[in-house]
Amino acid sequence: MVRFLIRRLLTGVLVVWLISVIVFAIFFIAPHNVAQLLLGKFAAQNQQLVQTVTKQLGLDQPIWVQYAHFLNRLFHGDLGYSYYSHEPVTSLIKAALPITASLAIGAAIIWVVAGVLIGVLSATRPRSFTDRLATLFALIGLSFPTFVLGLLLLYFFFYQLHLAGVTFFPGGGYVPLTQNPGQWAQHLILPWITLAVASMAVYVRLTRGQMLEVLGEDYVRTARSKGLRPLRVTYRHGLRAALVPIVTQFGIDVATLLGGAIVTEQVFGLNGLGRMSVQAVTNQDEPVIIAVVLLAAVFVVVANIVVDLLYAVLDPRVRLS
Amino acid sequence: MALLEVRDLTVEFPTTDGLVKAVRGVSFEVDSGETLGIVGESGSGKTVCTLSLIGLAGGGRRGGQALFRGQDLLTMSADELRAVRGAGIAAIFQDPLSSLHPLYRVGWQIVEMIRSHEDVSKAVARKRAIDLLGLVGIPQPARRVDDYPHQFSGGMRQRAMIAMALALNPDLVIADEPTTALDATVQAQVIDLMVRLQKEFHSGLIMITHDLGVVADIADRVLVMYAGKAVETAELDDVFYHPHHPYTKGLLESIPGASGTRGKLRPIPGSPPSLIRLPSGCSFHPRCRYVMDRCLTDEPPLMDVGAAHRSACWLPATLSGLAEGTEAQRMKVAEAARSEDTPVAEGES
């Protein structure tokens, strides 16, 4: 168990390191001059200024020296400064992460609870009206682009309701949970729904498929033969067994989202990691891009380890070694 | 009145290929302390015919009557039937590994069974689970009660299944090929255990199997099924020494080293018919060595061929048994009642 954990952590560190090398390299292969970009119209007038800025940013050094500096700073918890705002990248992330986390975790809870419940309902009555309705819903959810759904929700729940005098749903923005939990939730309801719908559809299909398989298993027949209540057979015996692959998928999905929900954040004007990375890419703000990519990688790596540990908790037949 | 009286049971499954007639009018009874062996090949309807009684055969349209302690199982409400399952009629299945829930401890599964029917505390139920595991011969039951099924051997798993089935002292136990998935030595142990426990609990037992050897060890009476019908019912000894139906005889002759074969194995030619498109007349006629003309057109009902011995075959009632003289007579009767162009099944011997 401990050995498993150590091995997985070491692999994880290796993965994150490899990603850092790749991201670092990509930005130096790309043909651009940061100093020139930063200086804009001044660059053309003053070539010396360009050189000064280049030197200041350490961009005149060989790439491996720059990378060594970067790594060294990283170990001291310093991700550098944004080329644009000149703020430390760590404080930018500190500001953006709670927003993305609020969005992702809230949406995840909605989609997993609703998706699994609908999936179970649909599997216990295959080919019924409920099942067909769930399938239709899943198809629509899957094929609906997030930005269209987000804009539609805004149109009806923000614009139309405001015209009708109901001002419950704000049109965007964010209020920290610590400041006002009520307003926090109020601001996030529409983004949560927007983000949850597509994933919910995936979980409906996943749960339905898993449940249909499990409900045909011999041990479910045994549960019925014991004279248990149908709900107990479905949930305690059926869903319990179907849950293992669902949990695996869920861990990875949440981790991926924590790296930023670009479209949803953009539509609702939430300054989370997703929006931050879009801006950073547009501005070629390398320190920010690298930081966001690394953070996302760490989330995925950690989630993978957590999922593996959960696997052993959920299934006694799995031994970690 | 017997503990379980099944009258003219039919079970049909509508499928896209047509109506599957899995059980076509089967009647039998089982009393307390009695063991009925139901024998037949895969697809003969032996499992459906029993598990459908407690609603475990996966839907299907059921007809006829099945009186358990005087109440018809087929017309009961879902809740009434649920109360019967486990407490009144318990089931033991073929593969103990897949029949126990892999993610729950063995003891937990037995406790769940007890507590879903009786209002007892967890501690009391657990104590009973440990006692039951001890009763079925699990060593160190107080420790093994917290094991998961995968930590048990195949034989131990089936013992645990038996313990669970007996947890509520049911009046009737349905055992669906309980030894098929086990090693030969373990098979014998499990059969011995079931014989012993049945005496102790005085419950009725239905043993479903394709293995006549198992039936010989445990059954009082035997019902032979073919293509969804009972083709022969008799006391145990009559089945083994005086079989009347050619199918029963064929089953006996295909057991290695069994009584009537004199060292020769004679497999039944062909394979069981489709339950959607059954042969005309007697459904066994395409595989029968004694086929007569009327077998192609008339379906034989179960007829008395001896004391408590019934067979669904047009051969004369006197022609049962495995003696060589009887065999010669059977061939003579069959040949006389057959026209030139009637095809006769020939197996290699």
Image: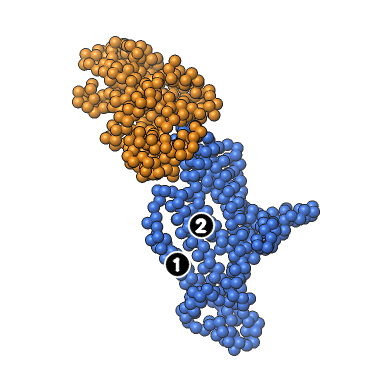
Chain colours: A blue, B orange
Circle 1 SS class: helix
Quadrant occupied by the N terminus of chain B = top left
Specify the label residue B288 is tagged with: none
Report helix, strand or loop for mark 2.
helix
Quadrant of residue A281 within the rendered picture: bottom right
**Which residue is label 2 attached to?**
A252
For marks 1 and 2, the one nearer the N-term is 1
Residue type highlighted by circle 1 = Val
Residue A61 or A103: which is nearer the viewer? A103
Coordinates of residue B26 in the picture (x, y in percent): 42, 20
Q: Residue at x 45, y 51 (%)?
A: A313
Residue lying at the far bottom of the rendered structure:
A48
Image spot of residue A88 (x, y percent):
59, 75
Query: Residue sitting at 53 percent across and 44 percent down?
Result: A208
* Residue A157 to residue A11: above or below: above
Q: Which residue is mark 1?
A: A13
